[in-house]
Amino acid sequence: MADHSSSNWHSTSSSPYAWFQSSSILQTLSDLQAARAMRIQNRTFIISGGASGLGKGSALELIQAGGYVAILDRVDPEAGQAVEKELGSSAKFFHCDVLNTESIAKAVQGAVDWASKTGKPLGGVIPAAGVNLPAPILNSKGKVVDLEEVDLVLGINIRGTIDLIRQAAVHLAKVEPEGPDGERGVVILVSSSSAYDGQYGQVVYGATKGAVASMALPMARDLARYGIRVVAIAPNLFVTGMSNLMSEKAWKSISQTFLFPNRAGNPPEFSMLVKHIIENPMLNGTVIRLDGGSRLAKM
C-alpha cells in the first residue's frame, strides 16, 4: 500500500505550497488577474462634485491611470473651466446641479457625447456631490431644525445621487462588455462614517449617508444583469473643503478618536481605493469603511 503520510509527502517537496510559489504559476495567476481587472485606461468616468474635494482627487487618480473624466459640478463655468485646464485634456467640465433632473440629463448627455467623440467609452459613475448642514433636531435654545435645510441635504445627497446614477446607467448598460466576465462598468457611491457614528447635529446628514450605504447591495443586484458593479465607500474625516468648515473644538474632539495613522485622511488615500475598486471585479454590493480604524465617540 502506498504511503501517503505527511512525512513521505514532504520528502518530495520542501513546502506544501511549492507548486504555488513557482514563478510560472505566479505569472499565470498574475496574467489571469490582469485579464479580469476592469480597464481604467481609455475609459470615461462621470464624477459629480468633481471640481473639489474627494471628487477632484478621484478625477486626478483616474487621469493618472490613463482614464478620462467628465467633471459634473455646480460651480460657476469659469471655476469649472479652471479645473478642466488644471486636470488637462483628459478632463471635461459640465455644469450640473444634481437637484435638477434636466441639468443632470444635459450634463450626462454631454459626457456621453464627449466619450463618443474621443472614442473612450463610459467606464463608471462616481456621485461624489454632497452637502452637510449641521443642525440638531432641537438645539439648546429650543429651535428646531429648518425643513428647508432638511430638504436641501436630502435632495443633494440622496435624490441627486439616485438621479445621476439612473441617468448614467442607461448609457453605461449600452457599453460593449469587456474581459472574461463581460463587465461594463462600476458605480462608486460615497457614504460616510456618519452613517454609523453620527455626531451631534448630524441627524439629517447621517441619515442621507446611511441611505447611500444601504443602496450598494440592492443597486448591485439591480445592475448585475448588465455587468455593472456597485460599491460604496464610507470615509471618516478627510481633509476637504467641507472638513475645513469644522470648528477647532470639533477637530480636536475627532482627532482623539484616531488610531493609526493618527490624523485625518487625505484625498489621494480615498482615490487610491476608488482605483482599486474599479480594477478589482470581486468588489461588489458592499460598503468599505475608510477610517483608519477610528470610531467616533460622542463629541
Image (tube, rainbow, N blue to C red):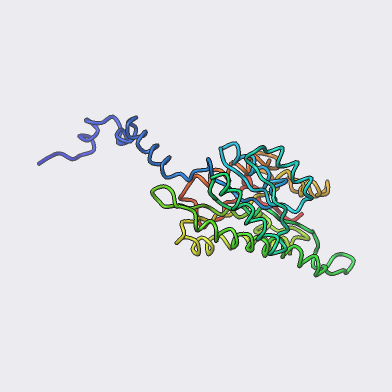
Q: Is 57 situated left or right of 115 in this image?
A: right
Question: Is residue 253 at least partly visible in the picture?
Answer: no
Q: Is 17 situated left or right of 231 in this image?
A: left
Q: Position of residue 255 (x, y in %)?
A: 74, 44
192 w.r.t. 143: above or below: above
Number of marks drawn: 0
Q: Out of 184 and 284, give the one closest to the viewer.
A: 184
Q: Out of 298 and 84, give the one closest to the viewer.
A: 84
Q: Out of 42 and 236, give the one closest to the viewer.
A: 42
Residue at 49 percent of width and 63 percent of height = 221
Q: Position of residue 201 (x, y in %)?
A: 78, 61
Q: Position of residue 134 (x, y in %)?
A: 79, 59
Q: Pick out the residue farthest to the right.
A: 141
For residue 15, which quarter of the picture?
Answer: top left
Question: Is residue 118 at least partly visible in the picture?
Answer: yes
137 w.r.t. 275: above or below: below
Q: Quadrant of the C terminus?
A: bottom right
Q: Pick out the residue farthest to the front.
A: 117
Q: Position of residue 294 (x, y in %)?
A: 65, 48
135 w.r.t. 256: above or below: below
Residue at 55 percent of width and 50 percent of height = 122
Q: Quadrant of the N terminus?
A: top left
